[in-house]
């Protein structure tokens, strides 16, 4: 029956190819949407691991998270240095790292911070940052480059770079009077850190000083001689995470300035609620395409039945039972579904190869070719089971055909 099914499909190869392609497109879309959703959530969660609170000016929690951790957007107004010192001096605070933003380097976000950033920042469930070349800040004019930035422009230690004012690719003012020297290249993390350029807090503040930019001595260590007037945000780690609500309330009630203390995990949940509608729409669209592909398969099998009545009658006349013919139609459906699933996975893999550079550049998302997850296998299994169930309809029609019906000449 398998040999007969293969020969039958080959005789109808054009229609079979179109049906397989329709199933493959639906499988590729379903798997692509699921891969995009899971990798986006994993990437955002990995980038925020190890940070108990993000302190910034009073504002929307999601916006603060996107700006400070993922390098997308801005925090609006900054916070005063004395407000940051208040937070750093709280007894429950184990460490704090100031953050300054607002510049870009050839479209990549520039972050002003201290050397503590590379010691304190964690990603992917607690992994520390590692250098693949060089090290941390050694002078006020030092810069540390994320792996994606280094690969995009071929940077190495010793390279001089110039930053510009403005977010994204918009360069309002080029800071060519104060170049920075690359002193370290970070190893890939799979997070937004790969797309960032880090400079010293002193260097960042000197460029944006009121009046003329302050001169920087590259031979001096990066010690903040004069604290900046304002910073954009601060990462905070606590001695005990159970005290997070206490610290959050103390920061919120600070009378000197309106501050927000954002818990990254809570902000991520809010972000998922916002994106949930889009995810649902994408899933519905993918499901609709899958249903259309399965309907196409049923239509092809059903439409071919009337033309194959004589074929089935001859098979019956040489000893084939109705059950054999039924199994033959099911085998054809299984072959079409199997080919569609395999082709669909290949199409998704090729699509990811072309889409990953764009998604990585614009959103910091990496969708590498991976072994299908349990959920992806379950989705493919659901498509396969639905198609197998749908094929029972034309198979049942064949089962009811008789030899006399197949041999009768109809005009």
Image (spheres, rainbow, N blue to C red):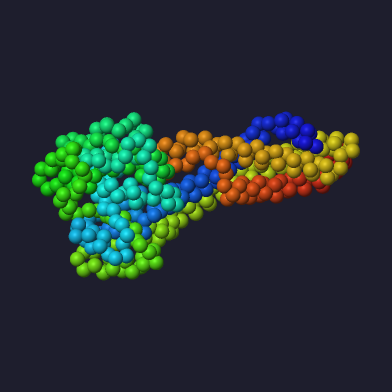
* Residue 21 at least partly seen: no
Q: Is residue 250 left or right of residue 331?
A: left
Out of 26 and 35, give the one closest to the viewer.
35
Task: Identify the image quadrant of residue 81.
Answer: bottom left
Quadrant for the N terminus in the image: top right
Residue at image position (45%, 38%) is 355
Residue 279, position as x, y percentages in the image: 48, 52
Residue 344, position as x, y percentages in the image: 58, 39
Residue 258, position as x, y percentages in the image: 23, 64
Task: Identify the image quadrant of residue 360.
Answer: top left
Quadrant for the C terminus in the image: top right
Residue 334, position as x, y percentages in the image: 71, 41
Residue at image position (74%, 40%) is 331
Residue at image position (39%, 66%) is 242
Residue at image position (49%, 49%) is 38
Out of 218 and 16, give the one closest to the viewer.
218
Tag count: 0
Out of 330 and 350, give the one closest to the viewer.
350
* Residue 210 at least partly seen: yes
Quick one: which residue is furthest to the left in this view? Answer: 211
Task: Identify the image quadrant of residue 57.
Answer: bottom left
């Amino acid at each position: 029956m398998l040999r007969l099914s293969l020969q039958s499909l080959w005789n109808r190869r054009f229609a079979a190819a179109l049906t397989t392609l329709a199933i493959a497109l639906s499988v590729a879309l379903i798997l692509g949407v699921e891969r995009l959703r899971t990798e986006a959530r994993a990437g955002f969660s990995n980038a925020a691991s190890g940070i108990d609170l993000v302190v910034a000016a009073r504002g929307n929690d999601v916006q603060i998270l996107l700006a400070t951790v993922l390098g997308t957007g801005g925090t609006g107004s900054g916070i005063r240095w004395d407000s940051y010192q208040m937070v750093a001096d709280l007894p429950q605070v184990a460490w704090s790292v100031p953050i300054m933003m607002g510049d870009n380097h050839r479209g990549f976000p520039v972050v002003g911070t201290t050397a503590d950033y590379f010691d304190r920042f964690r990603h992917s469930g607690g992994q520390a940052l590692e250098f693949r070349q060089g090290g941390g800040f050694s002078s006020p004019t030092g810069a540390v480059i994320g792996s994606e930035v280094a690969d995009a422009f071929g940077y190495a230690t010793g390279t001089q770079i110039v930053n510009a004012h403005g977010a994204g690719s918009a360069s309002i003012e080029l800071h060519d009077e104060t170049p920075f020297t690359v002193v370290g290249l970070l190893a890939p993390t799979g997070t937004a850190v790969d797309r960032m350029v880090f400079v010293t807090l002193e260097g960042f503040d000197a460029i944006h000083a009121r009046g003329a930019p302050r001169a920087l001595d590259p031979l001096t260590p990066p010690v903040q001689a004069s604290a900046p007037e304002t910073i954009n945000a601060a990462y905070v780690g606590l001695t005990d995470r159970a005290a997070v609500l206490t610290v959050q309330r103390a920061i919120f009630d600070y009378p000197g300035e309106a501050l927000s203390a954002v818990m990254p995990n809570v902000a991520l949940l809010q972000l998922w609620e916002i994106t949930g509608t889009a995810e649902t729409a994408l899933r519905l669209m993918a499901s609709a395409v899958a249903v259309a592909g399965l309907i196409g398969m049923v239509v092809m099998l059903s439409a071919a039945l009337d033309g194959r009545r004589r074929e089935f009658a001859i098979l019956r006349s040489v000893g084939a039972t109705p059950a054999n013919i039924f199994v033959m139609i099911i085998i054809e459906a299984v072959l079409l579904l199997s080919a569609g699933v395999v082709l669909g996975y290949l199409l998704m893999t090729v699509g990811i190869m072309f889409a990953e550079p764009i998604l990585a550049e614009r959103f910091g998302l990496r969708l590498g070719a991976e072994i299908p997850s349990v959920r992806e296998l379950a989705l493919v299994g659901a498509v396969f089971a639905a198609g197998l169930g749908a094929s029972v309809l034309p198979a049942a029609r064949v089962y009811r055909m008789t030899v006399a019906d197949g041999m009768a000449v109809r005009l």
